[in-house]
Amino acid sequence: MPVSYLKQRMRGTKLFKWQPDADVLVALATLYLMWASYYGMMKIDWYNKNAVILVVLFVILTNTVMAVIFPVWWVTKHRKKSISELGITKRYLLLSLLLSATIAAWRGSSLPSFITADYLYYLPTFIASALIFWEPFFVFGWLQTRYEKSFGIIPAIVLAASSIIFYQIGSVPSVGLIDLMPVYIVLATTFSLTKSIFTLWPIYWCIGSSVNQLSLGMHSSWDVVAVYAAAIFIQFAAINYLRKKKSSRKK
């Protein structure tokens, strides 16, 4: 990368520091609630058996309201900062997409070992994965940027990767989670280079999330695609509303 870019990236931050603030405490609270929702989804019988409750509590309240809408509200309205602080930016867009395609090719190289049926059988999994905006946004756009402000670039990378592990404890086999830690470190490092969500979504997430699911013996259905499509529509509508509301206050 150009030296000028690296200098600009380092401006205003450090590799290591200790300046915890209210933002990081709020971020950690949302991380705990994310774990509670995941754990509850897998462990509480009535929660698993009722599809309506599952969609409302997990997809809408957890993955949409808490993981996307709340962080955007917190940064743009409560903190009165730009939405670019959460990685939603056109800056370094080409570089971000190139990085995303590169790590997607790296992660996707393992796909043939997991595909045992016709490729069309796995199509819903890839489409559903591409519609999962909330996860890279929550982990990297929200948590990692809060960690970096409080602890610096290097701790933020480790904490972001660890956060993905944390909120899946109890809902995903522990051996599979431990094996994925190096992958999450790569993702957090890649995001750190540009601080753009497009470094990971949608190109990488379409491939990477699909590989993760298939490696754990999971796959998505067309019903899941429909639910995720509705969820991402709500997420983007809310982001656009809050962004425009902040812009109108500036005028």
Image (cartoon, helix red, strand yellow):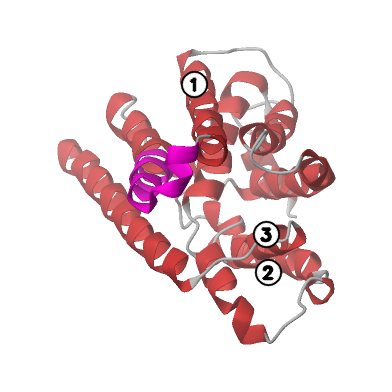
Question: Would residue 77 appear left or right of 156 to someone viewing this image?
Answer: left
Q: Is residue 113 above or below residue 119?
A: above
Judged by depth in the image, the label closer to the viewer, 2 or 3, is 3
Between 136 and 12, which is closer to the camera in this rendering? 136
Q: In this view, does 205 lie above or below 154?
A: below
Question: What residue is disc 1 on?
Answer: 29
Locate residue 215, reporting x and y percent: 76, 60
Question: Would residue 235 appear left or right of 206 to someone viewing this image?
Answer: left
Q: In this view, does 213 lie above or below 193?
A: below
Question: Which amino acid, mark 1?
Answer: Ala
* Secondary structure category for the residue under label 2: helix
Which badge, 1 or 2, comes first in the chain's sequence? 1
For the residues marked 2 and 3, what is the alpha-carbon distance in whole angstroms? Answer: 19 Å
Which badge, 1 or 3, comes first in the chain's sequence? 1
For the residues marked 1 and 3, what is the alpha-carbon distance in whole angstroms? Answer: 26 Å
Question: Which amino acid, mark 3?
Answer: Gln
User: What residue appears at the point 35 percent right and 44 percent down from the top-left corner?
Assistant: 53
Between 230 and 198, which is closer to the camera in this rendering? 230
User: What residue appears at the point 58 percent right and 41 percent down from the top-left corner?
Assistant: 140
Q: In which quarter of the image is residue 184?
A: top right
Q: What stretch is highlighted in magenta?
A: 45-64
Q: In this view, does 25 lie above or below 242?
A: above
* Secondary structure category for the residue under label 3: helix
Question: Would residue 75 appear left or right of 205 to someone viewing this image?
Answer: left
User: What residue appears at the point 62 percent right and 65 percent down from the top-left corner?
Assistant: 219
Judged by depth in the image, the label closer to the viewer, 1 or 3, is 3
Question: Which amino acid, mark 2?
Answer: Ala
Question: What residue is disc 2 on?
Answer: 101
Q: Quadrant of residue 223?
A: bottom left
Judged by depth in the image, the label closer to the viewer, 1 or 2, is 1
